[in-house]
Amino acid sequence: MVDFRRCITALAVLALFAGLAVAQTGTVNPLQCATNVTVTPTLRGEGFTENTGDITLTCTGGAPAVIGSNVPQVNITVFYNTQFTSRLITQSGGGLNNQISEALLLLDEPGSGLSAPVPGFGPAAPQNLCTTPLTGCIEFVSSVAVPLPSPPIQVATDTPQGTTATTPGRNVFQGVANADGRSVTFFGVPILAPGTTASRVIRITNARVNAQPLAGGSASGASPVQASISISGSNSLLITNSTPIVGFVVNGLSASVSGTGAFNQCTSVTKASVNVVRFTENFGTAFKTRVQAQTTAAGAGQGNGTSPPQNVPGTIYNSESNLVVPVSGGTAGLADYGTRLKAVFNGIPAGAHIFVSTANVFNNNLAVTVPAFPGGSGGNTGTVGYAQLVTSETASDAGNALGSFLPLVTATDNGPNNGNVPIAEIPITNGTGTAVWEVVNTNPNTNETFGFGVYITYTSAVSTNSPAAGTSTVTLSYAPTPPAITAPPTTGLAASSSLSIPRFAVGSIASASIFSISLCRTILLYTFVTNQAGFDTGLEISNTSQDPFTTGSNATAAQGGTCALTFYGGTTTAPTTPPAPYVTPNIAGGTVWVDTAQTRVPGFQGYMIAVCNFQYAHGFAFISDVGARNLAMGYLAVVLPDPGAGARTATPMGCAGITGISSEVCNATGEQGAH
């Protein structure tokens, strides 16, 4: 004897996952839907286009429909407490519709692979797009016979098919962005009542929002993204929990610079290490690949065409893309690239060349191990974070379609010392250059840090003030960062058909000093110089940039340059008018310049300041009567702090903030580089 109760129970369980309608008899419960967000993700507070969690409505009840009649339609609108920013799709046939988006509504989990009592329907049905999203799609009530004693199962089809239905209806619907900039509507969605022993699943996915306004707004450290669901149309759905939380927002990035590199104008450098810029994610899924790598092939996580499509409803994909489904005029759910990290270098002096590592490093002399399959899922690629330098912040991995790879920058050289760090030069325009790296492999189960080496090359040209002295800075952020948007939400960040996904704000990360170039000069004060009353002054300047300290932290390079002598005071013929300045010949490292006041400024008495275009200058003055027969004295020139190296103070003998001076000299004399 057949246990009919067991058969009916089994069929009901299958229908629960399939979302197919079962004809019912007797008392009919109202059609009602329970809302759920299976996974509530953490959203990056810097993100303009953050993927929210999928909303599912599990609907039960409702009266059986008449075979051949139209399936009742509803409009489902989802409001958010921030801007709705899913990509707007270009439609086929030319022109651009500025409302139809990549946000999708799916009926009965098509393509999910879940068990279905009727082959080809429910979860076993192919994803079938409604191509008229502004009005929805009309479906018809049909039925499919099942083994007795179970009653026929009602299904929705594109055309009336009676009790011999073979073709499933439309089950994928695109959302239309509304003018308020904060909501999306799915029009004309046919909802066939499943009855009391089955359920129908409605999934809303690929909804992106601007998380930036919500960043840092909660005392707990995370602010909720609130959705509100509204139903309208010719049919009605009762919804429990119509205001689900679809995400929590926290800032996703911390960044730092390992230190400020110190250089001077008069010493040429080649691929000198500057520092390491570091990007750290604040939670494990803040760094994402473009799609989730599903094969070991290189670039599978960037869409190189060898990875299966990311199109199974309900699957958690730790990637910038979500559910990837072809639609008219584009691909819904597909991001343009993975997470990108950007360093913007500012104030780079002319003549300086900036290089960066083409992949992440442990330090400036040690690169991370290149994964066996960069971008793939095999070997150590799933656990070792890896990022590569790309040509720009907006260059797409694949032109909005799967089948390409990263727009990589090829290394042109290697870093200094052991030379195992591949590097490439960053173009500098008007003192600004940008480096962008894309995350190729990432481990979602840990907070990762990506460090990238920075290097500098320049040729010293003191005579032309190159490279100019000053401090250069760097700003670190996600990428891309579109131009500042000041328009109201209805026309600004509501959604875009042209701006890329993902995109970010610079955030609260301030610019940091990355390196400084100091002037190569020493300022000497001769407190008294005279060529009056039978006295003369001998003047001497030594260039001690050549010395025995050629290794270690005390290493110096021989420098050469002139000294400009400026006189303050007057002459016997013009007591209030100082002589014209005098520029010495070039004083090479390891040599001295000598002269007399009688030769340079006859009849002068006052003081003199010498500005020498090299470091480690020493000055000496010797005053005597002519021939040094009766009176004579000598003194060391005082070294004044360089105003170009820091603020000038009222105590010029101090060493604080002074560059170009060894600690030994400073501690012994309190003077900058000379005594």
Image (cartoon, rainbow, N blue to C red):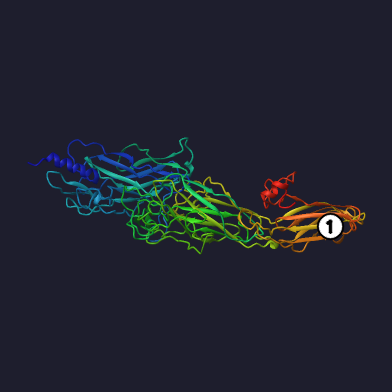
Residue at screen point 48% across, 42% down: 215
Is residue 443 visible in this depiction of the protein? yes
Quick one: quadrant of the N terminus? top left
Residue 395, percent from left and from top: 46, 59
Residue at screen point 74% across, 63% down: 586
Q: Secondary structure at mark 1?
A: strand
Residue 644, percent from left and from top: 70, 52
Residue 410, percent from left and from top: 48, 63
In the current view of this chain or complex, which residue is farthest to the left?
Answer: 1
**Picture quadrant of residue 544:** bottom right
Q: Amino acid at mark 1?
A: Gly
Report the residue marked by disc 1: 538
* Residue 670 in the figure: left or right of residue 440: right
Is residue 479 visible in this depiction of the protein? no
Residue 32, percent from left and from top: 28, 38
Dot 1 alpha-carbon crowd within 10 angstroms: few under 14, some 14 to 19, many 20 or more: some
Residue at screen point 67% across, 47% down: 657
